[in-house]
Image: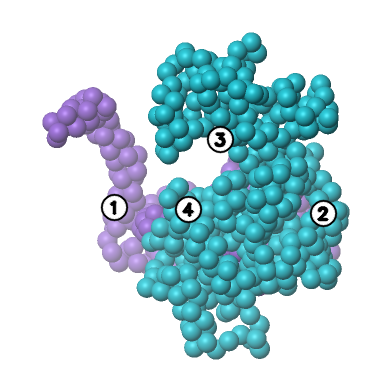
Amino acid sequence: MSIEIVSVNKQFGSFTALNDVNLTVPSGELTALLGPSGSGKTTLLRIIAGLETPDAGSIRFDGEETTDRHVRERQVGFVFQHYALFRHMTVEENVAFGLTVKPRKERPSKKEVRERVHELLRLVQLEGLADRFPSQLSGGQRQRVALARALAVEPKVLLLDEPFGALDAKVRVELRRWLRRLHDEIHVTSVFVTHDQEEALEVADRIVVMNKGRIEQVGTPAEVYDQPANPFVFDFLGSVNLFHCRSEQGQARAAAPELSMGYVRSHDIEVERRQSDGAVEAEVRHIQAVGPAVRVELLVRGTGKTVEAELSRDGAERLALGLGETVYARPRKMQTFVADYQI
Amino acid sequence: MSGTSAKSVRTRTEPAPVRWLLIIVAFLFLGLFLFVPLAAVFAQALEKGWDAYLVAIREPDALAAVKLTLITAAVSVPVNLVFGVVAAWAIAKFEFRGKQLLITLIDLPFSVSPVISGLIYVLLFGLQGWLGPWLQAHDIKIIFAVPGIVLATVFVTFPFVARELIPLMEAQGKDEEEAAITLGASGFQTFWRVTIPNIKWGLLYGVILCNARAMGEFGAVSVVSGHIRGATNTIPLHVEILYNEYNYAAAFAVASLLALLALVTLVVKSFVEWRMRETS
């Protein structure tokens, strides 16, 4: 089912959580709402669910006006950041809850409920844990129970609020890959909120980048990463270095000669021993190995500005850099924006 | 390894003599001010023997007092149970104007002397009070009658349940309720199947304290009761009357009923506290 969000506004006291937001979530896709805290992404998710009411604007499910429909009737599955499992119920009772609260006429028999619950527990790989209580499960297991519980009522839309936010790093990565595979299996229209760009880039079909209650850009992971619409998106989706654009970047000069800045990702900076076209002279200030990469902090001569280059381990070993040495940094790929945004 | 940890414990806490001194002082104090009087109540009650004790508590006025106390508790505890849950729900789950005022008002009976609480009702419903003439014209008796006693008791005991539930429900947040609603549960189903199971031990704890106070309240009830023997005397008031008549054995015999209630309350309370720790 597709979701349309039309001119939605939401105010909390004097704080504007959402400012004229328009968005269409296509049917069957996995969409990420990505943004820093306070960007309005969770509010938007809760408005889609019906847990909050927009001050203005409307929500349509498959073109049908849904704004005034109660949460209960929207048939959404909502997965909460802190799972919100019913603590006094077993895993089985938690998953069955949505089925057992149905009106008597629609309610499946006890046997059907049992079968459905066990089918779902198989799907989330928690079959053996049906009789456990939430307090006896790990974070990752709780999150999967929450997911099974939301799926039990066969929702038309699955909404997940920071689904991996409360997990430790390794479990996070495992679980988000698993979620991606699950989505490929069941194809329910899904929206998840995250502040982690890596998570959004890895899992989502489409990314909606939000900032200060507005949508900055909507696109596939490749689009938002490679062609960011503005400096905010560029900055939010990865490391950033600023270069003044008076160098020989023809395109940049044409766009806005004096005011524009060149945005370069750390891994798009080439560090060389010899001067070459478009390179700036810099001094090595700091070298740090981070996992598979080596981060080198460079002080650009004559400007007092620092840039950060990310080299591969091999590359760094070949250069054999030492602190205080002079090198030449050349942006391989640069993007320019009119300078209305400061980092 | 064990040597260093023992040493670090020693450096972190007070020296043994200080610890023991503090513990002994605490126990002596409690013994002197709580245990000795409690023992004295039972000793005095049984001073003239078991038969005299039974006669004293079977005496018609005493039985009437017990009955009235039970009626009062039977009305005020359920009323405050409902009020407490409603108020705690409103405060913990909703944002609204005047929330702080509501919290302050709930605490009012704790900060006001019970005698004043009773006087308020006399001023409202008494013969010279605001509603007195109207009530008299319609032949409704509140002051110096059972309704007044119940009203005063409800007023004095209404913070107990609410006070117990507000922090508990605030700590639990509203995620589980929201989850229930998104899964299609109605308001009542959410309340009955999600909220109540989560707060039941806290609720029971509040009810026990509320009940203990309802049965033991003296000040507020004393003002509105009129001390009519066999009609408007609760157990605490009856004890006072017997005592003022120098009928010590009977006074202590009836008082021992309240003391027993206190002991039962303590045991149940400890059990509930233990359960609350287990479940949380």
The colour with which the image depicts chain B is purple
> Tag 2's secondary structure?
strand
Q: Nearer the viewer, residue A281 or A105?
A: A281
Q: Amino acid at mark 3?
A: His
Using the rendered image of the protein, determine whether residue B92 is visible from the camera's viewpoint: no
The residue labelled by disc 4 is A173
Specify the amino acid type for callout 2.
Asn
- Contact (CB < 8 A) between labels 1 and 2? no
Chain in cyan colour: A
Query: SS at mark 1?
Result: helix
The answer to whether marks 3 and 2 sit on the same chain is yes
The quadrant in which the C terminus of chain A is found is top right
Residue A91 appears at what percent x and percent y?
A: 45, 70
Residue A116 drawn at (x, y percent)? 52, 81
From the image, tell me which residue sits under label 1. Answer: B43
Asked if badge 3 and badge 4 are on a common chain, one would say: yes
Point out the tag, 3 or 4, that comes first from the N-terminus: 4
**Front of the two marks 3 and 4:** 3
| Mark toward the start of the polypeptide (4 vs 2) | 2
Residue found at x 53% / y 76%: A96
Residue denoted by label 3: A267
- Horizontal side, residue B41 vs residue A234: left or right: left
Residue B71 or residue A174, whichever sits in front? A174
